[in-house]
Image (cartoon, rainbow, N blue to C red):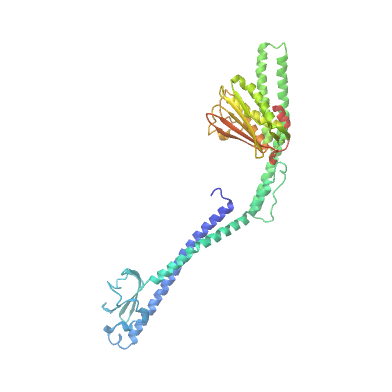
Amino acid sequence: MKRWPLRWKLAFYSALLAVVATLAGAGTTWLVMRGSEIAAFDRRLALDAGELFRNLENFEGGLANNRLAINEKFVPLALRARLIEIHGPGGELLYRSPNLHGPGLVASGKGNFPTRTIEGRTVRVGTFEWSGLTLYVGAEMTEINQIGQDILLGMIAAIPTVLLVTVIGARWVAQQGLAPIEAIRQAASSITVHNLDQRLPVPPSDDEIAGLIGVLNTTFERLQRSFEQSVRFSAKASHHLKTPISVLRAGIEEILTDPETPEKQQLRAEALLDQVHQLTSIAENLLLLARADAGRVDLQYEEFDLSHLLEGVCDDVRALAEPRGLTVEAELPKQLPVVADRKAVALIIQNLVENAIKYNEPQGSICMKARATNGEVEVTLKNNGEPISAERAPHIFERFYRARPDGRIPGHGLGLSIASELTRAHGGDLKLVHSDLEWTEFLLRLPRHGLAAPALSSTVIAGILGMAG
């Protein structure tokens, strides 16, 4: 149910509430109607008892002439089917209806109209007194019970109808109520890095929706300011970082080329130059990721042969893999035309390949495959080596995260992050397919015709990619 749309959740809970309310209402109505029927039943018994007393008083041969002469002729027709006992002033039994057997009606319980079980039947007993006589009238509750059952069954039978009407009605009400929310969602989804100054339209009503839109517009204003600050920071950082690093690198290279530099100082300078190169790479990677965060990646689309690019990468890989005894295999089509940013795709493949080399086992293998399918190109890269654990696998594309935290292997945990960001900028997908003792496999998917994600384009990446190359 957590994954249900909100309108269906509202419909379900409304229907559930309606069913509970219907059951509660049915129970209350049943109790009230049953009480009314029993009260009417008791009144009928009282009226019939009054008629019997009138017969005893007025008919010849009745009570006035002989108290012991009470017989069935004095019993009204309405009471002939009832259970009747008449007792005299001393408690002596003067009359008992022929259909009454057993202990009789005297020990009937508390109140004027107790309910008891007589001969397996539920009987309502009324006690009436007149001129020293006590009349007990018992009537079966079959009719009352049947009416109660009919009422209860009728109400229960109405539950499916109530449920259906409530679900349909609640869904309609929810749809009408959520229509402004849907409008807000659509308007908010149209706001991208290209139109951060756009705001959601505020309705004329002063309700909760208007308050929500006001909060969202305030949030968009803060995001716009933050975005603009990020863009300015990226531009300034690019300038201020590149210049001192370039000066530092040029100075170290000058020391290395100076013939008067002692050999010991040259060794130190070479180590420093290596660190400067690493610093340059880190700065360039961070700037690229900062631009990707700001959605300021502008891909220079062109048509090129991806197979030719991958063959060149494989040649470079073989040169790097040979000292470690690694085997490089490639299964590539003769031609694989694609519309994409050549430098960005090359950087994606380069980062994947570097990982495949660094984390491979001695005498291991690297296998690259590519193919076209369903308007996309797929590049699969596999390598041997220690597998990536299931706990670490979900985090491998996070920045500065290393799936195998081995200090002996150089790196800063940025390669896969950059590859993932550039892939998303193309509207593609990069994922870890699986990693076990045999293979660690990555799958890269890119659109063949340059269908880039619209929210991830702007500013120039070409200079950064040029430096990274």
- Relative depth, front residue between 262 and 370: 370
Q: Looking at the image, which residue sits at the far front?
A: 334
Q: Is residue 204 above or below residue 336?
A: below
Q: Which quadrant of the view contains residue 290?
A: top right
- Relative depth, front residue between 326 and 204: 326
Please give the name of the residue rendered at 64% of the width and 24% of the height, measured from the top-left corner. 317
Please give the name of the residue rendered at 70% of the width and 12% of the height, measured from the top-left corner. 261
Quadrant of the image containing the C terminus = top right
Q: Is residue 40 at all visible to an observer of this figure?
A: yes
Image coordinates of residue 64 in percent, x first then y, are 30, 86
- Left or right placement of residue 253 versus residue 45 in this view: right
Please give the name of the residue rendered at 67% of the width and 11% of the height, measured from the top-left corner. 263
Image coordinates of residue 336 in percent, x first then y, are 68, 33
Image coordinates of residue 67 in percent, x first then y, are 27, 84
Q: Is residue 411 at all visible to an observer of this figure?
A: no
- Left or right placement of residue 437 versus residue 452 in this view: left
- Left or right placement of residue 221 versus residue 437 in this view: right
Q: Which quadrant of the view contains residue 142?
A: bottom left
